[in-house]
Image (spheres, rainbow, N blue to C red):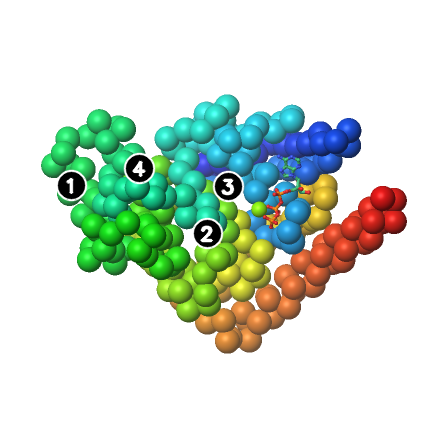
């Protein structure tokens, strides 16, 4: 695989709330090659979103650096697109207008925008719904629009924070398959946050398991299973058990920490 696309070096993140110091991330080093599909996996509160936000440039690290596409991250940038769990669409715009929005900002001609929007809507099976408003769409469709909107900007890096977390199992699998198809077609570098072990194994080239507070890297492994992956296969299930064990250890640390905090309060 080709050169490093995202380089995270010595990243720490400390939050100060109500006079307390919370170390959310400690000494994170992670180098992601161009085109790799990486999943960040870990229990709630382990710092997955904090790390993703540091890469997105929404909240910078307390110390350490992130480089994306060779440049130091000091804020959001056009080479990094973000998809959130809650479908961040403009409710007053139609599907088509939502997808076109970023292209208008870029100052593309009307014809160029129209062509690109049509291609993206077709790619995400949304062509029939182009005139609808977000409130008239299902959750899965809204998330397709959110993905189309980010793809419209053609950022080489896609950051996704539990984008399918709120969807039912069937819709989720459909969108996972679509994302894999798109990824194969457009060759983006994807950093995808999930706390679903099965989702991580189904999608990723590489899985980075995080520890519970402070968030550090517990395990960094390549998923060697051939695609398209079969969640019923013995190899899939062996990996699922291995990762399940790692995540459970961290969940247990989470519960212990909560019990201790409750005893102090
Ligand atoms: N802005 C903030 N101010 C204070 N503490 C924060 C802030 N953002 C996150 N935290 C804390 O940092 C830790 C990591 O949070 P983060 O949201 O990154 O976890 P996560 O792994 O994404 O969890 P989840 O799976 O629930 O989304 C948590 O303990 C959280 O409470
Ligand atoms: Mg999160």
How far across and down, in percent of the image, does residue 159 sit? 45, 42
Marks 3,2: beta carbons within 8 A: no
Q: Assign a secondary structure to mark 4.
A: loop
Mark nearer the N terminus (2 vs 1): 1
Residue placed under numbered mark 4 in the picture: 153
| Badge 2 density bin: few <14, some 14–19, many ≥20, Cα 10 Å | many
In the image, which disc is placed on residue 32? 3
The answer to which quarter of the image holds residue 43 is bottom right
Which residue lies at the image location 71% right of the left edge and 29% below the top edge?
16
Q: Please state if 111 lies on the left or on the right of 143 as rendered.
A: left
Q: Nearer the viewer, residue 197 or 258?
A: 258
| Badge 3 density bin: few <14, some 14–19, many ≥20, Cα 10 Å | many
Q: Nearer the viewer, mark 3 or mark 4?
A: 4
Answer yes or no: is residue 62 visible: yes
How far across and down, in percent of the image, does residue 129 sit? 23, 55
Q: Please state if 200 lies on the left or on the right of 177 as rendered.
A: right
Which image quarter holds the N terminus?
A: top left
Marks 4,2: beta carbons within 8 A: no
Q: CA distance from mark 3 to mark 1?
A: 34 Å
Q: CA distance from mark 1 to mark 4?
A: 14 Å
Residue 165 higher or lower than 11, as above or below: below
Q: CA distance from mark 3 to mark 2?
A: 20 Å
Mark nearer the N terminus (4 vs 2): 4
In the image, which disc is placed on residue 114? 1
Residue 14 higher or lower than 184, as above or below: above
Mark nearer the N terminus (1 vs 4): 1
Which residue lies at the image location 77% right of the left edge and 32% below the top edge?
20
Q: Assign a secondary structure to mark 1.
A: helix
Mark nearer the N terminus (3 vs 2): 3
Residue placed under numbered mark 2 in the picture: 163
Residue 65 higher or lower than 141, as above or below: above
């Amino acid at each position: 695989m080709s050169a490093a696309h995202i380089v995270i070096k010595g990243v720490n993140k400390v939050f100060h709330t109500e006079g307390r110091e919370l170390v959310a991330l400690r000494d994170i080093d992670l180098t992601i090659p161009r085109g790799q599909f990486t999943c960040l996996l870990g229990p709630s509160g382990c710092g997955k979103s904090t790390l993703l936000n540091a890469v997105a440039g929404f909240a910078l690290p307390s110390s350490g650096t992130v480089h994306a596409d060779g440049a130091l991250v000091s804020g959001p940038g056009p080479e990094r697109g973000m998809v959130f769990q809650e479908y961040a669409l403009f409710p007053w715009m139609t599907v088509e207008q939502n997808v076109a929005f970023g292209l208008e900002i870029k100052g593309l001609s009307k014809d160029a925008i129209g062509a690109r929007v049509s291609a993206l809507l077709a790619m995400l099976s949304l062509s029939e719904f182009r005139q609808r408003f977000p409130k008239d769409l299902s959750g899965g469709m809204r998330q397709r629009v959110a993905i189309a909107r980010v793809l419209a900007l053609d950022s080489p890096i896609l950051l996704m924070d539990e984008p399918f977390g709120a969807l039912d199992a069937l819709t989720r699998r459909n969108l996972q398959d679509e994302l894999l198809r798109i990824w194969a077609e457009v060759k983006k570098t994807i950093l995808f946050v999930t706390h679903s072990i099965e989702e991580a194994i189904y999608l990723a080239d590489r899985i980075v398991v995080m520890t519970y507070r402070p968030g550090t890297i517990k395990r960094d492994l390549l998923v060697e299973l051939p695609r398209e992956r079969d969640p019923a296969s013995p190899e899939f299930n062996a990996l699922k058990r291995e990762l399940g064990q790692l995540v459970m250890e961290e969940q247990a640390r989470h519960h212990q920490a909560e019990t201790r905090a409750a005893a102090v309060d």
